[in-house]
Image (tube, rainbow, N blue to C red):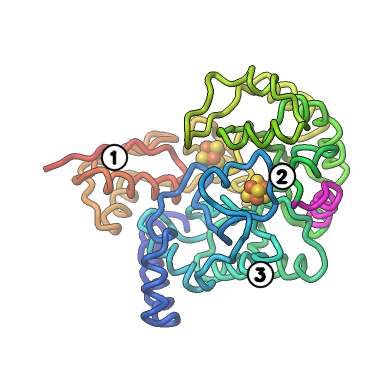
Amino acid sequence: MDGVNSLVDAVYAKEAIVEELRRRVGEEGFRRASRDWHARRRPIPCGMTVHTGVGCSYGCLYCYIYDMGFTGKPQPYPLSGEELALALALNPYVAPGPRGTLLAFGSVTEPFMRETAWRAIEYLESTRRWLGNPQQVSTKTGLKGRLLEKFVEAADPRIDVLVSMTTLRLWKALEPGASPPEERMEFMRRLVEAGLSATLFLRPIIPGVTDREAEDILSRAAYAGVDKVVLGTLRVAEGILRRLRASGAVDMGEIERRLARWPRRGEQLPIYSRDLKEKIALKAREIGFKVLPASCSANIESHRQGCAACRLGPCGDLSRLPPASDREVARLLEALGLKPLKVSVKGLTVEAAIRGGRREAEIASYWIIGLLRRSPRVKAVRS
Ligand code: SF4
Ligand code: SF4
């Protein structure tokens, strides 16, 4: 998907995908897909999140999903694989294709729980087949046996697998349902051995726990062949603080000291962790890791692309940014049904003025991020 035709072609390809999938899933399937949240939600910084299940049984004490109303009794996500691909193709913010919107599987749930693993594999296969977007999955499960084989068969061959680790010693107390850390390490080793991309997701960094174990975790991951790491801050809500305190496993004084203020009801707040991240990043680099600024960066790296869409970047190989001229971008926006008044590609930024409101500006912005991997500065101009 390079050059003028390919940018515009992505729009037409999406229309053709919708038409074909609509025919395949029938009117009832089309209704389910078009009403689904995947057809409407805006991407978040790591890309478009794909929910493979609802709820999670792993019960991590630091997890925010229970404070969002999700339960510990997971169900596979209700759409079929083709319906899910159709929902994403119907989403006006999603650009399809190998150079399109990044897909992130495993948000607000664990994809490879017993109850949802086959659904996750079905979604990886269907989105790969119908949309072809860069895939990333984040997990605390050490896949093995038949599931691992099916996963490797189904997923995008350049998929990035983010394997989360917080502790080696206290996982039974803090992540009671997750795979033991040694199984997660073994999973990463097998991925690397199979030529796939595995990234260590050292998240959340729990002060007094993760920072103390970081060197050990990093060394074991390096031994498994992993050479990329993403570091993530602990975010707390009232329920998380309550559960962590009740566990008796962590130093709550250290966590509370790092909070700018107490979280209000329904609110999540990050703790201060820059010092811990800097210390761990230093150690990681010494061991030979590339320390990436965000999970999307690992997706960009594994797909050998470049991205300069946000201030955390640039990431990956900038020589692989898709070429873009003012005219090409204007044609893309027109093909999306938008009315560009002015477009200007300035290095790593795309400025545009669009006739319309916030929604039109957002659609333009997400396609600029998705297809051009540049930072959008889009202004809506009401007539
Ligand atoms: S595995 Fe993920 S979604 Fe499930 S409880 Fe743990 S952090 Fe939350
Ligand atoms: S520049 Fe890097 S961190 Fe920012 S959106 Fe792109 S890949 Fe993600």
Q: Give the residue at x 61% y 33%.
A: 293
Label 2 beta carbon within 8 A of ligand 1: yes
Q: How far apart in space, not on screen, are marks 3 and 1 (Cα)?
A: 42 Å
Q: What secondary structure is the stretch in magenta mostly built from?
A: helix
Q: Residue at the front extreme?
A: 246
Q: Is residue 34 above or below residue 188?
A: below
Q: Callout 1, which amino acid?
A: Ala
Span colored in magenta:
177-191
**Nearer-the-camera pick, 24 or 9:** 24
Left or right relative to 161: residue 370: left
**Nearer-the-camera pick, 313 or 4:** 313
Q: Give the residue at x 15% y 41%.
A: 382
Q: How far apart in space, not on screen, are marks 2 and 3 (Cα)?
A: 20 Å
Q: Is residue 259 above or below residue 341?
A: above
**Residue 188 belongs to magenta span:** yes
Q: Position of residue 154 (x, y in %)?
A: 66, 69
**Residue 28 belongs to magenta span:** no
For the residues bearing labels 3 and 1, Cβ distance under 8 angstroms: no
Q: Give the residue at x 63% y 33%.
A: 242
Residue linked to disc 3:
118
Q: Which quarter of the figure is the C terminus placed in?
A: top left
Q: Which circle's residue, 3 or 1, is located before the other in the chain? A: 3
Residue linked to disc 1:
352
Q: Number of labelled discs?
A: 3
For the question of whether residue 298 can be seen, the reply is yes
Mark 3 neighbour density, 10 Å: few (under 14) some (14–19) many (20 or more)? some
Q: How far apart in space, not on screen, are marks 2 and 1 (Cα)?
A: 38 Å
Q: Which circle's residue, 2 or 1, is located before the other in the chain? A: 2
Q: Callout 3, which amino acid?
A: Trp
